[in-house]
Amino acid sequence: MVATNKAVSSQLRGKETLRMFSRSLVALPRTAGVTVSAPMRHYHEIVKRTGTNQVFVQKGPGGRSSNSGHVATVLGCTGFLGRYVVNNLGKRGTQVVIPYRGTDDDRRHLKLMGDLGQIVPMRFDIRQEESIREAVRHSDVVYNLIGKDYNTKNFTFEQVHVEHAAAIARICREEGVTKLIHVSALNANENSKSDFLRTKALGEKAVKAEFPDVTIVRPGTMYGFEDRFWNRLGWFVKWLPGGIPLMNGGKTRIRPTYVGDVAHVLGKLENDERAVGQIVELYGPKEYYYAALVEFFLDVTRRHQVAVYLPKFLGKALAAITNSVLAIPIISPDEIERLYVDDTPTPGALKFDDFNVKPFTVEEQIIRFAGLYRPHEYQRAPYDAVVRKYTTEDVKF
């Protein structure tokens, strides 16, 4: 019995010793293992901007955990294109100032696009010059992505595209910003019947007068998960079972481009000096009739709606009604007007090829967005190779 008690006592002492040893292991500092691992390689590079002789020191392991030496302000960061631009800058190690209005939920997703302290949110009111100054004061690159597709009660096309754009350009010049990148639109024309395209052209002129070295970027019709292109067709498919309205007989020629490709080029413009004072036009590699794209969308989604051809006056009237009823209109009267304008590239403008970017085609990307609007029985159906072509070279009216 005595021997048994001694054995039990010995086991208890052994367990207590093991517990104490385990506690001592837990208490070890977390950095203890770093000394035995291989050191992380870092890069250190000094880059000089040729136009202004400004010097930037790049350092870090690369990617989001590095520091490119640049500070960029992205005005319009919470919009469709803005989130992709912030992501491209963040993964380059650029510190990004993201002025926003609305609630914190509007910019929450942007916080994850850079390392700790690299994404700097701040409240912003475009009507107050001091707010604009505070947003651009510490930046060497400013992106102006602010724009709107339709008039609202608080902002008009003229205010956003002309007056506020000119104010941003003037303040950037006064605050010593060395590079301004202003996003306009393909087909911008002072004589256009579309107020959107007309004010975009007037805005380019006003910005150029205030900041002569501005880089003007004109993207084509952009598509993506948050777009007003495929999602609009999807809305028609779900809520207008009778058919999809087509304007201009569906003969309008457009060159859709993926929003990620546009953002990729905008990110490159941070360091690219060739585009200073130039016009950059970013449109898709293939041209389509609008009717062919609608048919393409219906083929991919396995839907059987038909096209309904509407005259312009009726389309604008119906769009005006939806504007007055819906908080966010599906289509506005001015967007109806734009459906009568063919995409026309400007000779001599810089393109995707000039930045060594090969843009995606609609055939490569459409399943990602149109597939969301398939009926439930076709959700897992494979995306077969497109046998029939849809470009203007293959479709004849």
Image (cartoon, helix red, strand yellow):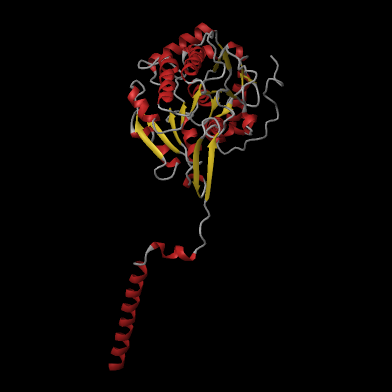
Residue 1 visible, this orientation: no
**Relative height, residue 366 to residue 161 (above, below):** below
Residue situated in front as seen by the camera: 263 or 327: 263
- In the image, residue 44 sits, relative to residue 313, either above or below, namely below
Q: Residue at x 66, y 25 (%)?
A: 286
Left or right side of 93 for 282: right
The answer to whether residue 25 shows anywhere in this view is yes
Q: Residue 308 appears in which quarter of the rendering?
A: top right
What x and y, as percent, mark residue 174?
41, 24
Q: Is residue 44 above or below residue 89?
A: below
Of residues 32 and 55, the one nearer the viewer is 55
**Closest to the observer, 255 or 39:** 39
Q: In the figure, is residue 105 to the left or right of 226? A: left
Residue sitting at x 37%, y 25%: 132
Q: Furthest-front residue in view?
A: 53
Residue name at image x 52 percent, y 8 percent: 193
The quarter of the image holding the N terminus is bottom left
Give 135 or 23, whichever is nearer the viewer.
135
Query: In which quadrant is the C terminus drawn?
Result: top right
Count of marks placed on residues: 0
Q: Which residue appears farthest toward the top when viewing the image? A: 313
Res. 97 image quadrant: top left
Left of 370 or right of it: where is 2? left
Q: Position of residue 59 (x, y in %)?
A: 49, 47
Measured as percent of width and height from the top left, residue 127 is found at 34, 20
